[in-house]
Image (tube, rainbow, N blue to C red):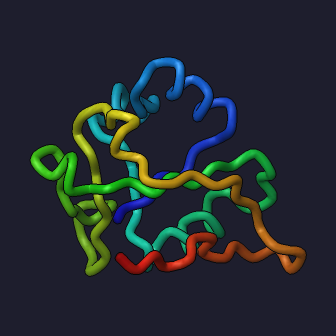
């Protein structure tokens, strides 16, 4: 699974459109996503204090051809999933309202589901 952080208002727009298509897809050519290992760190760095976030869990196997794992700045050891097409809503496995806890820290909100 990969994860995308969005806002409640953007999520409503995506649901109306039937696909996830943020500005980054138009401006940068891809949708920023994160692995489970990095999503909390990303939220803490970019979204501290936000109370309007939605975390989307996305099944990347449905978009594999248009998904690339790349370094965020073109270098360095960390790679992130970048999706080069709008993501159909049927790729979203789960969604959750997401904000920092009382200590101001984000925690990974999804419990592991065993099949």
Q: Report the side of 112 relative to 52 (left or right).
A: left
Relative to 97, residue 91 above or below: above
Q: Which of 38/95 is in front? A: 95
**Residue at the left extreme of this rendering:** 65
Report the quarter where the N terminus lies.
bottom left
Residue at position x 68%, y 30% in the image: 9
Rendered residue at 42%/33% (across/down): 20
Give the percent coordinates (x, y) of residue 31: 36, 43
Q: Is residue 61 above or below residue 37?
A: above
Q: Residue furthest right?
A: 102
- Relative depth, front residue between 75 and 26: 26
112 and 29: which one is in front? 112
Q: Quadrant of the C terminus?
A: bottom left
The mark total stands at 0
Q: Measured from the top left, where is residue 45 in percent x and y?
A: 62, 66
Relative side of 84 to 87, left or right: left
Instruction: Return the residue found at the far front.
Output: 115
Name the quadrant containing residue 18.
Answer: top left
Q: Residue furthest top?
A: 17
Quarter of the view holding residue 60: bottom left
Q: Residue at x 82, y 73 (%)?
A: 101
Considering only vertical position in the picture, is 89 above or below 53?
above
Residue 10 left/right relative to 66: right
Q: Is residue 43 above or below residue 54?
A: below
* Residue at x 53% of width, y 19% of height: 16
The percent coordinates of residue 33 (x first, y second) are 39, 55
Q: Position of residue 23 (x, y in %)?
A: 45, 29
């Amino acid at each position: 699974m990969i994860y995308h952080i969005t806002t409640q208002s953007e999520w409503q727009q995506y649901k109306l459109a039937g696909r996830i298509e943020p500005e980054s897809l138009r401006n940068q050519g891809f949708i920023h996503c994160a692995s489970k290992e990095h999503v909390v760190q990303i939220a803490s760095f970019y979204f501290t204090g936000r109370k309007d976030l939605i975390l989307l869990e996305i099944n990347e196997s449905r978009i594999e051809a248009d998904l690339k794992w790349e370094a965020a700045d073109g270098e360095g050891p960390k790679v992130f999933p970048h999706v080069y097409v709008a993501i159909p809503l049927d790729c979203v496995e789960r969604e959750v309202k997401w904000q920092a806890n009382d200590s101001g820290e984000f925690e990974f909100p999804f419990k592991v589901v065993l099949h």
